[in-house]
Amino acid sequence: MPSDFYGVVAQGAVLPGDYGLMAEGGVEVLRFPIEWAQVEQSPGAYDWSAIDAIVGGAAANGIEPLPFVWSTPAWVNPQKSRPPLGNAGEKRAWEGFLAALAIRYGSVVDRWQIWNEANFKQYWKPAPAPRDYAELLRLSSKTLRGADPGAEILIGGVAPVKRGMLPWKFLEGLYRVKGVERWFDTVAVHPYSPELFGVEFQIRQALDEIDAAGDRGARIRITELGWASDGPAADPMNKGLAGQAKMLEKAYRLIKRHRREWRIEGIDWHSFQDVGPDAGAPVCSFCPGSGLVTAAREPKPAWDAFRGFARP
């Protein structure tokens, strides 16, 4: 298997001891958010402390950092989920931030994911727009590859969410933009589903769109996939402790078996850790209980299942 195949997604704060635990469990990639709105709260005034800690902690333990960059600061637009595409000034501000990121972290970070779930209204206001997202990709690719020609650009993972555009419809619209395949290397998907057939269906749908566009060089990375061990009883994504581990095993066996056929370059479990009720409003109904370890860093059966694949 590739040495960067098995990853996890940080949910909430990453603690200093987490990196050693991840490395012991075979985690090869740590996906985490870089929120522009938090790092550059006023023009040109950067607070790198939180990002320094994650990038440094991961790299020191042999784990590849995979950031997804998103969120617009209030001095650009009062809505952080509105992309910085309203005028030339907003676009220049976005390019300036990406250039600063590349200068600071380009020697360690080889992959950059642009935004997150742009097919979802929660992350892309006022409404998902593949053509507009293509413009953000163009600006981002130009800037990041200008600093590091070998940088890998991933699209923000597309997910089957309510109040959003179906992932394959979003990809279809994205590929309608002439030349868009030049602005990214990897299609990222978040094929959440209560059952395994839904995961496979979404991966195959993404492949169909890639092949229909003739983008033969594109790969797929599953930058989010997971189920919860606890949460609302009626939520079909809540499988219980044993069921969460079983779903991980079944999904990873499926993906590993079809890795070459589906051109899968890696998979990142959402998430490494549970988050408690004091962490604020959850991103999704099952997210708080989706960790491989509890909020107190106690391993779950799913952690043992993950280690079985990452450290066979």
Image (cartoon, helix red, strand yellow):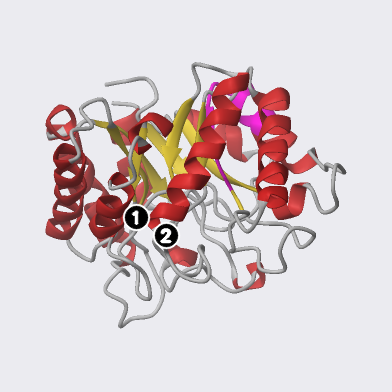
**Where does residue 4 sit, x and y in percent of width and height?**
39, 25
Residue 183 vs residue 25, the one in the foreground: 183
**Where does residue 220 sit, x and y in percent of width and height?**
29, 36
Q: Residue drawn 17% across and 48% down? A: 250
Instruction: Answer with the quarter of the image where residue 25 lies.
Output: top left
Checking the image for residue 226, the label placed there is 1
Q: Secondary structure at mark 1?
A: loop
Q: Quadrant of the C terminus?
A: top left
Q: Please state the extent of the stretch shown in magenta in the rendering.
A: 55-69
In the rendered image, the vertical position of residue 272 relative to residue 194, given as above or below: above
CA separation in Å, label 1 and label 2: 6 Å
Q: Quadrant of the N terminus?
A: top left
Q: Does the stretch in magenta take in 58? A: yes
List the residue tagged with mark 2: 290
**Where does residue 199 sit, x and y in percent of width and height?**
20, 54
Residue 90 vs residue 268, the one in the foreground: 90
| Residue 25 appears in the picture as rendered | no
